Structures are given as C-alpha cells and as structure tokens.
Amino acid sequence: MFKTLRDAFKIKNLRMRLLFTFLMLIVVRLGSQLPVPGVDPDVFSELFSNTGDAMNFFDAITGGSFEQMSVFALNITPYITASIIMQLLTIAFPKLEEMQRDGESGRKKLTQITRYLTIGLSVMESLAMAIGFGRSGYLTEFNALYVILLVAVLTGGSAVLMWIGERITERGVGNGISIVLVINIISRIPSDLATLYEQFISGKTPAKGVLAGVIIAAIIIAVVVLVVILQGAERKIPVQYSKKIQGRRQVGGSSTYIPLKVNTGGVIPVIFAQSILQTPVIIAALLGKSSGTGFWYGVLRGMSQSNWFDPDNWIYTIGAAVYVVLIIAFAYFYTTITFNPLEIADNMKKQGGFIPGIRPGKPTSDYLNQILNRIILIGAIGLSIVSLIPLVLNGLFDADVSFGGTSIIIIVGVVIETLKQIESQMLVRNYRGFLSE
C-alpha cells in the first residue's frame, strides 16, 4: 500500500489528484465541527451519552457530526439511502432499468434522480429532527422560522457533502462518497483507542498493560486480515468461447472466467440488518422510552447491541441470533437484485460462450445459481463473524467503542478499491508513455 502511494506521488497528475482529495477531506472534517446556529452542542452530547450504544454506528459513519449537531449532521447517509433505494427501484421499474443500460447518458439521468431523492430525504430527515428535538426542548428556539433555518442548514450540509463526494470521484482518487464515509469512521478511531487505553491499559501493572495492549492489537489485526480475505475471495467459473470463421480468418476460441465474489453484497447486508434492529432502539432512546418493564421493553433490550453477550443477561443475546439471520437473508436478497444469472447465461449464449461440461442457456443459469447460493452463505457467515467479534468483546469486557466489524469492513473495502484505482491509473500512464516513445 505504502509503495503504491509513494509511486503515485512521483506522477504529477496523480499527485494533484491525491492533494485535491486531501484538501476536500479537510473541508469535510472542518464542516463536521461547525455547530448549527442556535444549537448547544453540549446538550446533544449529553443526550446521546444517555442513549447507550444505540447511536454508536450512526455516530461513527457521521464522524461525530450528528452528536455535535454540526452543519454536516446528516452527513452522506441520505445519499447512501437514496442510492440503495434507486438500486431497488431499478429492479422494480423497467424504465429505470432501461436507463441503466443506456450507457453514459442513462447513468447521468439516474445520478440526477439520485441527487433529487437525496435532497428530498434530507429535507424529511431534518424536518423530523427539528420538530422532534424542538418539542423535546433540546433547541434554544422552537418556532416556524427556526425550523426552516435548521432544515435549510442540515439539507445544505448534506448537499455540500454529496457535491464534495462527486468532485473527489471526478478530480480526485477513488469513489468520493465512500472516501468521505471512511474519513468519518477513521476520525472516531483515535478517541476509541484512547477509551480502550484508559479502560484496559492505564493504571494496570506494566505486565498486565502490555498483555492487554498486545491482545487488543492482535484482535484488531485478526479482524482486518479476515476482512481482507473476505473482500478478495472469489470463485472463478471457467468460460470457453467457441471458434468462428469470419471471412478467411478464424476468430474466438479464447477462454476466460466469471469471477463470483464470495462477499457479493459487501457491507450492505450488515447495514440493512443493523438498521432494522437499531432504528426502534434509537427512536425509543431519543423519546426517553428505552427503560421500563414488560414484554416490549424486553424486546427493545434484545434489539440493542449493547445488551448482547452480557454474562448477567444472556437471554438478550437472542438478538444476536436474529442479527445473523437478517445478515444472511439480506445477503441473498441484495445479491438477487444485483446479479442476474439468467441474463449472464443468455449473453454468453449469444456470444458463443459456454461453461465446460454445462449446456448453454437455462442449465448454465441454474449452475450459476447453485454456485452462487453456496458462496453467498459462506460470505454471509464471514460477514456475521466479523460483525460479531467486536460485539462479543463489548459484551464480555464492556469495551465501549464506536467502531466495530462493520466499520472495519467499510474501511478495508474502500482502501482496497482506491488502491486498485490508483494502480490502474499508473498502469494506463505507463502504457501511454510506452506508446508515445
């Protein structure tokens, strides 16, 4: 990784792209520290400190912006939600699917629709926040004018981050939205490491402190290695193309393969599962309804990750089992809507391609489905293990940190993809230099 970055800085074009990306990320972090006018950040910090671990993941992906109620409080979550909604709608509506197949012009139209949807979601979220916080007495003023101001500031902040992400994609390196998300998560890691130090190392004897530090480092490295393996694992399906006679020439006869990623859904299944379980907990915490007795309060406690793997209340760990089931279900669901084996089989048949030992057409589609169902399960189990390791440690040892398996999956995935893009740009430049000589 460091060698790739060092070589990239030797190339002027890439050096300027990296510098532009770095400057844009500074703007992101500065905006995350600017409070919304008329809001006392200390009030919201105290409010969220009383919600337990319910806000940990949301606080991590916003880089603390939401907790401080800054102008970037919504961050890029509306854009991510809008992108996921558009993916689902593309499957449901043939007209959107046709746009997606129209090449660059179709993708531009879909991007524009995603932008409008992002603004719409930002307005709805900020309006709900303004009214909810205002009625709870968390705002210094609560009237129509101030609600409009708050909605305008939060929506504008989300739009600015969306613009920055697109500019990074265009003039920087990597996917801008993903990089903004990663820098937000990374910004919380130093404080989390300080929390781990204070909790497990500070005040201990040198031997115990060193042992605790080594164990913490080993766990983090093991999770990162597992994520790297999970992100890079793929099943290669061999494809052979038959020979054809065109004029006096014989063409075709080449062989290639279809790479089926083990973790086809990326981090999306984890985010979906986490959102379903945590949204009711967050709403209840913000409304002050998270404590009490009775069946429904027990269900809420079981949905809260802070109660899982607690040695004193193992009954709530059933929520972790539900969490794993949801991850597996969403892994199959997301792969189903993004990967179409029948379409791939038809395209292979039209181009004269076939999988050795498998008949073209529907048998090929059935074979791909069979392979896909197996590797999706493996990938979903891997995602579940990565996601549960930090939760197990939090439950058993009360390690209160905002980053976990989900954050590590996002960081590793984005870093790997960004480095691949840098390497591909360096490779293209080397080829151009060779051809111009």
Image (cartoon, rainbow, N blue to C red):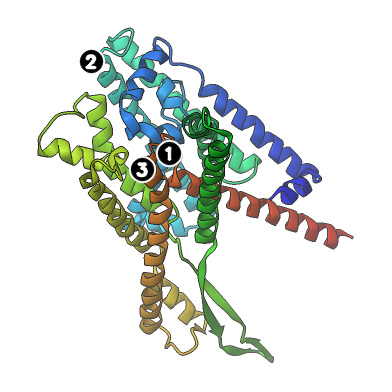
Question: Which residue is located at x 55 percent, y 36 percent?
Answer: 209
Q: Residues within 10 Å of mark 2 (few under 14, many from 20)?
A: few
Whole-angstrom CA distance, mark 2 to mark 3, is 38 Å
Three-letter amino acid code at disc 2? Arg
Residue 395 at x, y = what percent?
A: 34, 41
Q: How crowded is mark 1: few (under 14 residues within 10 Å), some or many (20 or more)?
A: many
Sequence order check, earlier mark of 3 and 1: 1
Residue situated furthest top in the rendering? 141
According to the picture, the residue beneath numbered tag 1 turns out to be 79
Q: Place residue 308 in its image quadrant.
A: top left
Please say if 30 is above or below 260. above
Question: Which residue is located at x 28 percent, y 10 percent?
Answer: 142
Residue 380 at x, y = what percent?
A: 38, 60
Checking the image for residue 135, the label placed there is 2
Sequence order check, earlier mark of 2 and 3: 2
Whole-angstrom CA distance, mark 3 to mark 1, is 35 Å
- Of 408 and 88, nearer the camera is 408
Residue 248 at x, y = what percent?
A: 69, 92
Q: What element carries label 3?
A: helix
